[in-house]
Amino acid sequence: MHHRTVEELMTRDVVRARQDTPFKELARLLEENDITAVPVVDELDRPVGVVSEADLLRKSADQADPAGLSPVPHLEAEERARAEGVRAEEVMSAPAVCARPEWTVVEAARLMERRHVKRLPVVDEADRLVGVVSRADLLRVFLRRDEAIREEINRDLLRGTLLLDPRDVTAEVRDGRVTLTGIVEFRTQIRVIEQLCRGVDGVVSVSGNLTFRTDDTRDTPSGT
């Protein structure tokens, strides 16, 4: 059992901007390539920031309303400078939050959540740009066929990792929902099995009616 890696899911043909790319060229890159953000790289092709639609829209939001109905929003000095920027290096969000190709889907998703970003430039050992992985890319794991998920759970997890007899425990999968049936030796095994199944790429939920032969959660009587 293994999680899919960033390298398996990332986009390799990456549209990129240079630090001196003009504002209008940035808008054109997003429009013509039907993307919502573009990494900004230095002369060694290392990401130094990201320009998103939100970064570009900051300039429009900073303009006065001709009708005088909406006040100009108050911006801190740094935000004001970015709103008035005319090149990528002036409007980009920096530094770039990057991922590595060997990272798992879980590692990339956690970094996106922690840093509140929607995509990650992917860099090699020399910090050069080799791809981009987005939220949509990570969600592709939920498009795995039920048969593939079932085989991974039954063969790799239940048999290969936990060494359970196929006559004792089996898993069925429908629309990513895993149903476990059977009996295990100890009660505490049930939670472990369910947690491991939830960690399989493409699994939406885990349920079932696993039973046990021995309740090893009870306190051992004193004096025994």
Image: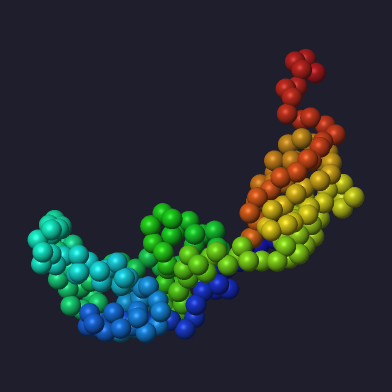
Quadrant occupied by the C terminus: top right
- Residue at the right extreme of this rendering: 167
Q: Residue at x 63, y 54 (%)?
A: 204
Where is 23 relative to 198, above or below?
below
Query: In this rendering, is residue 16 above or below 135?
Result: below
Q: Quadrant of the N terminus?
A: bottom right
Residue at figure coordinates x 46%, y 68% from the top left? 134
Q: What percent of the width, then of the height, locates residue 75? A: 15, 58
Residue 62 is at least partly visible in this image? yes
Can I make out residue 41 in this image?
no
Horizontal side of 65 relative to 15 (left or right) equals: left
Along the line of sight, the residue nearer the viewer: 190 or 52: 52
- Horizontally, residue 28 falls left or right of residue 121, namely left
Q: Nearer the viewer, residue 126 or 20?
A: 20
- Residue 197 at what x, y percent from top left? 69, 52
Is the image coloured rainbow, by chain, by secondary structure, or in one colour? Answer: rainbow
> Residue drawn 23% across and 71% down?
91
Q: Residue furthest top?
A: 223
> Is 214 on the left-hand or right-hand side of 138?
right
Q: Position of residue 78 (x, y in %)?
A: 16, 62
Q: Residue at x 76, y 60 (%)?
A: 150
Residue 217 in the image, given as x and y percentages of width and height? 73, 29
Number of numbered tags placed on the structure image: 0
Left or right of 97, for residue 5: right
